[in-house]
């Protein structure tokens, strides 16, 4: 495991009302959600980055209003059409 360090002003923790370790966990989750939303990583990899299992990560996706499905409308239509064949 690799550790990275991010410097933030002390005022950030006070403004958000969060301890540094709590904010670090939220930053990991937010990054994983965004990378998943952009299609850069799989749901499984995003859950791993966030330190969650897939079910927990899917709950987080719903909280962030991100679809747990990485299908475009066209891909979904093609998938549905192939079921009728």
Image (cartoon, rainbow, N blue to C red):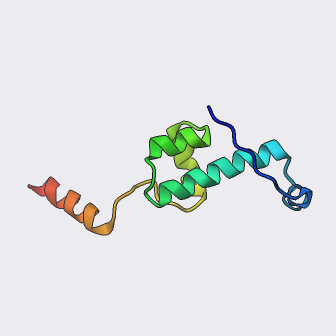
Q: Where is residue 70 drawn, in percent x and y? A: 39, 57
Q: Where is residue 54 drawn, in percent x and y? A: 50, 40
Answer with the quarter of the image where residue 65 lies.
bottom right
Task: Give the camera-side residue of 17 and 49.
Answer: 49
Q: How many marks?
A: 0
Answer with left or right where residue 23 lies relative to residue 3. right
Point 76% across, 50% down: residue: 6
Point 14% across, 56% down: residue: 82
Q: Where is residue 43 drawn, in percent x and y? A: 46, 46
For this orientation, the residue located farthest to the bottom is 73
Answer with the quarter of the image where residue 51 lies.
top right
Is 5 drawn above or below residue 69 in the view shown? above
Point 87% across, 59% down: residue: 9
Answer with left or right where residue 66 lies relative to residue 6. left
Answer with left or right where residue 13 lies relative to residue 1. right
Answer with the quarter of the image where residue 52 lies.
top right
Answer with left or right where residue 13 lies relative to residue 59. right
Is 7 drawn above or below residue 50 in the view shown? below
Q: Where is residue 34 drawn, in percent x and y? A: 55, 58
For this orientation, the residue located farthest to the left is 85
Task: Give the camera-side residue of 5 and 74.
Answer: 5
- In which quadrant is the C terminus drawn? bottom left
Task: Give the camera-side residue of 84 and 48.
Answer: 48
- In which quadrant is the N terminus drawn? top right
């Amino acid at each position: 495991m690799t550790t990275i360090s991010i410097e933030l002003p002390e005022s950030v923790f006070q403004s958000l009302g969060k301890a540094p370790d709590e904010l670090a966990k939220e930053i990991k989750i937010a990054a994983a959600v965004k990378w998943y939303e952009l299609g850069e990583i799989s749901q499984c990899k995003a859950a791993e980055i966030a330190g969650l299992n897939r079910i927990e990560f899917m709950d987080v996706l719903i909280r962030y209003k991100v679809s747990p499905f990485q299908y475009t409308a066209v891909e979904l239509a093609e998938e549905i059409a192939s079921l009728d064949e």
